[in-house]
Image (tube, grey):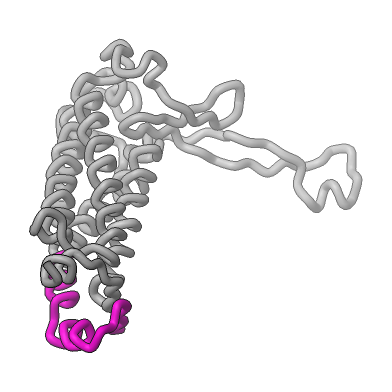
Amino acid sequence: MQELNQAEKMYFILTAKSLLWVTLSIVSTITLFTAIYSPKWLIGPTDYNCLSSKSLSAETNNTVDSPYYEVRCRPSVGIYYRCKKINGNQHCGSFAVEGLSTDSAMFPFVWKIGLVLMSAGVFVSFLMSALAIVSFCKQSISKKSVFGIAGSGQGLAVLLYLIGVICFAAGWGSERVVMLCGTQSVPFVSADCTNGSGLYTAAFGIVLTFATAMLSGPADRATSSDKVALQLEQGENIVFLL
């Protein structure tokens, strides 16, 4: 009975690898969440004046014929948001006015699939990040390693993210992208458009999530190392190995 209570007892174990793993888990989740809400996955080829204002020097001199400076913007589109010129100003917002039931001419069907998959990936990553934090205090659930469970979930998230990005590229032949990038736009070829920061953020987040999943194994081994076991045998309930 005493051995059972000892086995069920929770310890707070913090190692450099487990701390790095938890940090990357949180950062990768935030990165993909940010990418989904970015309107700059594809940047249009033409720019326009999206803001006019009096220059600082003109306001200082109080001249009548005040020169204006121009801010140039380009239309862009993401997997869920877009930016375009409305009433002379740059306006960014969602083009999915009716959610997933939005007309496919405005919200391509493959983008809907991509959005659902990437959102599911973020949800899984969020759950695995919470589980990673729990690993500081509880290293196993039903005799299964928390690190192994979370690492597998993060691997699943990577797969969902990848398919989501592929779905986005597969929609480059849609009416929305043709209007933005030119008539030569076809699936996986964006014609005159260029890749924007949102797409690069998504790619970085995918790589980061994959690295996080790979780090779950070393983090698990670090928390069950001989040094940790020695401190636990000495009666320590809180172990720091940084």
Residue 39's quadrant in the figure?
A: top left
Pick the residue in front: 75 or 66: 75
Tell whether 211 sits left or right of 47: left
**x then y, percent, for residue 101:** 30, 12
Asked whether 222 falls inside the magenta stretch, the response is yes
Furthest residue toward front: 1
Q: Position of residue 159 (x, y in %)?
A: 12, 44
Residue at the (28%, 42%) spot, across then down: 122
Above or below 52: residue 99: above
170 in magenta: no
The quarter of the picture where residue 28 lies is: bottom left
Magenta stretch bounds: 216-242
Residue at 20% across, 33% down? 117
In the image as oriented, which residue stretches furthest toward the left? 143
Q: Tell me where residue 178 appears, x and y as whole percent.
A: 28, 23
User: x, y (%) of residue 192?
Assistant: 29, 36
Q: In the figure, is residue 138 to the left or right of 142?
A: right
38 and 208: which one is in front?
208
